[in-house]
Image (cartoon, grey):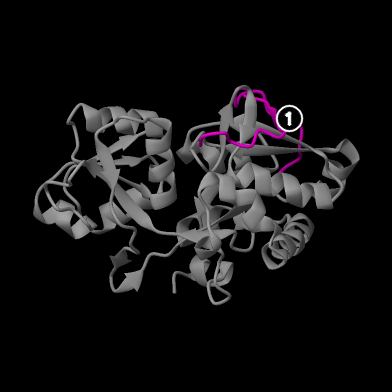
Amino acid sequence: MKGAMAVGLAASLAACTEAPQMGGQGGGNTLQRIRDAGTVKVGIAGEIPYGFTQGGEVTGESPEVAKAVFKALGVENVEATQVEFDQLIPALQASQYDMVAAGMAIIPKRCEQAQFSTVDYVTNTAFLVPQGNPQDVTSFEDIKEKGLGLAVLSGTIEQQVAQALNVGEIQTYGGQSEMLQALQAGRAYAGALTDISLRALLDQNPGVKFEVTEGFVPVVDGKEQIQAGGFVFRKGETELVNAFNEELTKLHDSGQWLEIVEPFGFTEDNLPPKDVTTEQLCSGE
């Protein structure tokens, strides 16, 4: 994002082979350990605007919200490790960090592997297409029916929706820049991500001849695939998750959350409705 809020989060782009000693899954009192250390380690994926590095600093919607939550919990320092999106949960399980702060959508498959916070935000899916959208693509069904190539990021909900709907040619990429390069080279017609992420990508690349389609909620087997993001913890970290949820809810209710996230393209429309819950999303209902 232009003028992104780099507010002093330390960017620790350490290799995943250098794991800190955090204990096993669900082991020990992680909340107390974090408080004693004054530092929490988080994982990000380098996806604008959710969590990325800029000028050597970590910023984005998720790290900034996490910083506010942990400050309320008495933890002043947030350090980040950047890995590819589909490696975020495996690296969390391997104790590379304490939590994922990457705008990760809450879906049943991920809930089997890790524990999610309360819903942080909701957003829509959209496509990045050539200016004028000459193929008039507005849905995954359009991509399938017209036999067009679709670019997605590996491990994202967009990839899973495209696979569930049997969209033909699905190309996976490790990051937004690689996906944009593929579209510019004509290897795929459209790129699928959240509408917020795609608008931010265009902001970062002025002059590219692409546009973002209107956001929508995909439907698979008659069920809406709601894009609701949250923070991710190892299973068994109940005390940490409960404390985090309490402070996150306060941010939502007080209006402070909106002040934090507005610079990253989020609006009041992205506040999670009360009837969209982590339990509901994890169950797939």
- Horizontally, is 198 left or right of 164 in the view? right
Report which residue position mark 1 lands on: 20
6 in the magenta segment: yes
> Looking at the image, which residue sits at the far left?
146
Dominant SS in magenta: loop
* Residue drawn at the location 17% of the way across and 41% of the way down: 149
Magenta extent: 1-25
Q: Residue 284: within the magenta? A: no
Quarter of the rendering containing residue 38: top right
**How many other residues sit within 10 Å of disc 1, few (<14), some (14-19) or many (≥20)?**
few
Q: Residue at the spot x=55%, y=67% of the render?
A: 272
Q: Residue at x 44, y 74 (%)?
A: 285
**Image coordinates for residue 84, horizontal then vertical, percent:** 48, 33
**Residue at screen point 39% across, 34% down:** 176
In the rendered view, tell whether residue 20 sits above or below residue 102: above
Question: Residue 249 at x, y = what percent?
Answer: 70, 65
